[in-house]
């Protein structure tokens, strides 16, 4: 099976951490850990062009 890459944009590191540790995600996280080889990487980004907008 070819590798799968998933890219998700988060408002902040805190938002990503909150999701990862949430009770809603916990059953999926546990199944993912027990049934797959995977790696999570959190990459900081910058809006060098100044065009990104975060909705309310």
Image (spheres, helix red, strand yellow):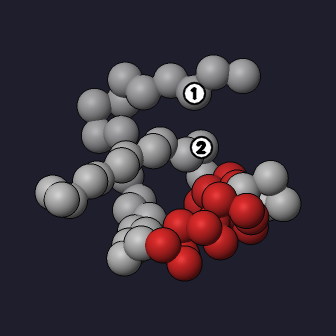
Image position of 2 with respect to 10: above or below? below
Q: Position of residue 6 (x, y in %)?
A: 36, 49
Rendered residue at 26%/54% (across/down):
4
User: Looking at the image, how many numbered discs can be counted on the residues?
Assistant: 2
Q: Label 1, secondary structure: give it.
A: loop
In terms of image quadrants, where is residue 37? Answer: bottom left
The C terminus sits in image quarter: top right
Q: Is residue 45 left or right of residue 14?
A: left
Q: Position of residue 2 (x, y in %)?
A: 15, 57
Q: Earlier in the sequence, mark 2 or mark 1?
A: 2
- Toward the viewer: 31 or 21? 31
Q: Is residue 9 left or right of residue 23?
A: left
Distance of label 2 from label 1 (alpha carbons): 8 Å
Image position of 32 with respect to 10: above or below? below
* Marks 2 & 1, CB-CB < 8 Å contact: yes
Q: Is residue 16 left or right of residue 1?
A: right
Rendered residue at 42%/72% (across/down):
36
- Toward the viewer: 50 or 13? 13
Disc 1 crowd rating (10 Å Cα; few below 14, some 14-19, many 20+) is: few
In terms of image quadrants, where is residue 23? Answer: bottom right
In the picture of the structure, the residue carrying the numbered disc 1 is 54
Report whether residue 33 is seen.
yes
Q: Position of residue 44 (x, y in %)?
A: 41, 60
Disc 2 crowd rating (10 Å Cα; few below 14, some 14-19, many 20+) is: few
Q: Name the disc covering residue 28, or none.
A: none
The residue lying furthest to the left in this view is: 2
Q: Label 2, secondary structure: give it.
A: loop
Rendered residue at 65%/72% (across/down):
30
The N terminus sits in image quarter: bottom left
In the picture of the structure, the residue carrying the numbered disc 2 is 11
Report whether residue 18 is seen.
no
């Amino acid at each position: 099976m070819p590798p799968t890459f998933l890219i998700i944009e988060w408002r902040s590191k805190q938002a990503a951490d909150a999701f990862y540790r949430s009770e809603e995600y916990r059953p999926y996280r546990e199944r993912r850990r027990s049934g797959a080889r995977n790696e999570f990487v959190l990459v900081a980004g910058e809006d060098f062009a100044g065009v990104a907008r975060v909705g309310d």
